[in-house]
Amino acid sequence: MNSWDERYRHARYFYGRTPNYFVAEQLQLLEPGRGLYLAEGEGRNAVFAAGLGHRVTAVDTSVEGRRKALELAGDRGVQIIYGVADLLDHSWSGEQWNHIVMCYAHMQPEAMPEVHRRVAAALADGGTLIHISFSKAQHGRGTGGPPDLARLHDLGELREQYAGVELDYAVEREVDLVEADGHSGVAAIIELVGTKV
């Protein structure tokens, strides 16, 4: 059992059953299409998207996350496809997606540029990137995100790593997060929305 399985094996949803505020806001602006949700955990964003009529595929390393995501989908009366895989195996990157959601997908620093490059490549022309993560200013705050500074994000680096995506909105700001046990309190956040060109 990996560390994410340990986190997700309890009855409660660690980040809650409702979608991330930013992801929900952006999804409601899109026409229904094929969406890919990477590092999707317990499925709160994917299930919300399916409820909006999107055809949803989620990927995460956690078997427990998948189990709870499918339970949540059942509770909401929607269907999602959920694959258990490491993002580094790139099994998800052979198709073209109308939108891709990266919600708090904090990988090892050596993996980030390649995964982000493949995310950009996997978007269909005109497709939408929705990305939210913790910035390096979050280090030491204790309100969410990895404790390792190297796994936190830098806005300038993200701009470079998502080459081929025109960022229509790219902001670093403080947000008061209320996401169950996982994210609680004022946090330093990066929000991105981009279009594949």
Image (tube, helix red, strand yellow):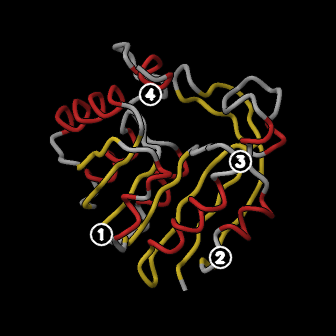
Q: Residues within 10 Å of mark 2 (few under 14, many from 20)?
A: some
Q: CA distance from mark 3 to mark 4?
A: 27 Å
Q: Eyeballing the image, is 158 above or below 38? A: below
- Residue under pointer 1: 33
> Considering only order in the chain, which callout, 1 or 3, is on the residue closer to the N terminus?
1
Write down the residue under mark 2: 163
The numbered mark, 2 or 4, whose residue comes first in the sequence reads 4
Q: Amino acid at mark 1?
A: Gly
Q: Earlier in the sequence, mark 1 or mark 2?
A: 1
Residue indicated by mark 3: 109
Left or right of 179? Residue 5 is: left
Horizontal relation, residue 36 to residue 131: left or right: left
Dot 2 and dot 3 residues touching (CB under 8 Å): no
Amino acid carrying mark 4 in the image: Gly
Observer-side mark, 3 or 4, equals: 3
Q: CA distance from mark 2 to mark 4?
A: 32 Å
Seen in the picture, residue 124 relative to 76 is either above or below; the reply is: below
Q: Quadrant of residue 36?
A: bottom left
Report the disc number at residue 16. Answer: 4
Q: Which residue occupies 71% across, 40% down?
A: 175
| Rendered image quadrant of residue 144 | top right
Mark 3 / mark 4, whichever is N-terminal? 4
Q: Amino acid at mark 2?
A: Ala
Mark 1 residue element? loop
Q: Earlier in the sequence, mark 4 or mark 1?
A: 4
Quick one: which residue is furthest to the top in this view? 10
Q: In the image, is residue 139 above or below residue 155?
A: above
